[in-house]
Amino acid sequence: MRQFVIVGHRAATSGDFSLDDMPGSGGRIDILARCVTAAFLTSFNIRRDTRVRLVLLGQPDPPKSIRLEGAELRYLNPDERSTGALIRIALTADVTHGERASTRGIYVQRASLREVLLQIGEESLFYLDENGTDLRDATFDANNATFVLGDHLGLLEEEEVLIAPSKRISVGPVKLHTDHCITIAHNEMDKRCSKQ
């Protein structure tokens, strides 16, 4: 399973943001929506071997985590607005008693980054950071890797310490948008899998 964990530091944690103003009222939900489409969509298909976990830390009710399962996903389109709508629907679910399903393949729970990482485990966990080992030279299982990424703010120091320094991987020398990093990581994994 390929996994991407994306932290949205200002991302809204209730479903009352406007789809017409995802950067403002949604606390940069637009970034998370682009990451979701980059992680799952290929030309005319959905990556069924992929899971995305969004960690939302903005107001009014942090933290929340949304898990999207490629094997189950329906209704995912390439436009930012419809992906934002799926996130908004998930944020209306009552998470008082644990994880809840919202639409097909999308689940929401109350969980911080630390809790999400504990659920995943450390073995196949990597932090995409421009100061890490080059992705092309790094050793990892292309069929079972989890990449942690920050939003436009990156990861905070207290979040970075949750991941071992030896687990840092770079996609290149230039700082890129989070969704672009996901595309590059997928491309490298696709190449490795095609050689197996």
Image (spheres, rainbow, N blue to C red):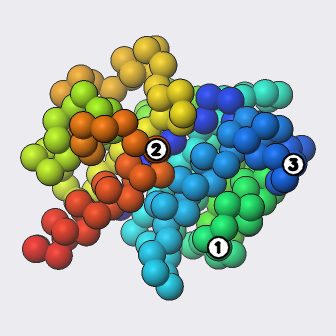
Along the viewing direction, whichever of 56 and 121 lies nearer the viewer: 56
Q: Earlier in the sequence, mark 3 or mark 2?
A: 3
Helix or strand or loop: what does disc 3 sit on?
Answer: loop
Q: Nearer the viewer, mark 3 or mark 2?
A: 2
Identify the image quadrant of residue 112: top right
Give the class, few, some or many, for how many residues have Cα within 10 Å of label 3's Cα (few <14, many ≥20).
some
Which label was assigned to residue 77? Answer: 1
The span from disc 1 to disc 3 (Cα, nearest Å) is 18 Å
Residue at 83% over, 28% down: 60
> Mark 2, residues whose alpha carbon is within 10 Å: few (<14), some, or many (≥20)?
some
8 sits left or right of 94 in the view: left
Closer to the chain start, of discs 1 and 3, is 3
113 is higher (above) or lower (below) than 68: above
State if disc 2 and disc 1 touch (CB < 8 Å).
no
**Residue at (31%, 55%) from the top-left corner?**
185
Report, in whole angstroms, how far the alpha carbon at label 1 lies from the one at label 2.
20 Å
Q: Give the residue pinned by disc 3.
A: 18
- Identify which residue is drawn at 43% across, 63% down: 50
Q: Nearer the viewer, residue 180 or 106?
A: 180
Helix, strand, or loop for circle 1?
loop
Residue 57 x, y percent position in the rendering: 66, 29
The crowd level at tag 1 (other Cα within 10 Å; few <14, some 14-19, many 20+) is: few
Q: CA distance from mark 3 to mark 2?
A: 23 Å
Q: Amino acid at mark 1?
A: Asn
Q: Earlier in the sequence, mark 1 or mark 2?
A: 1
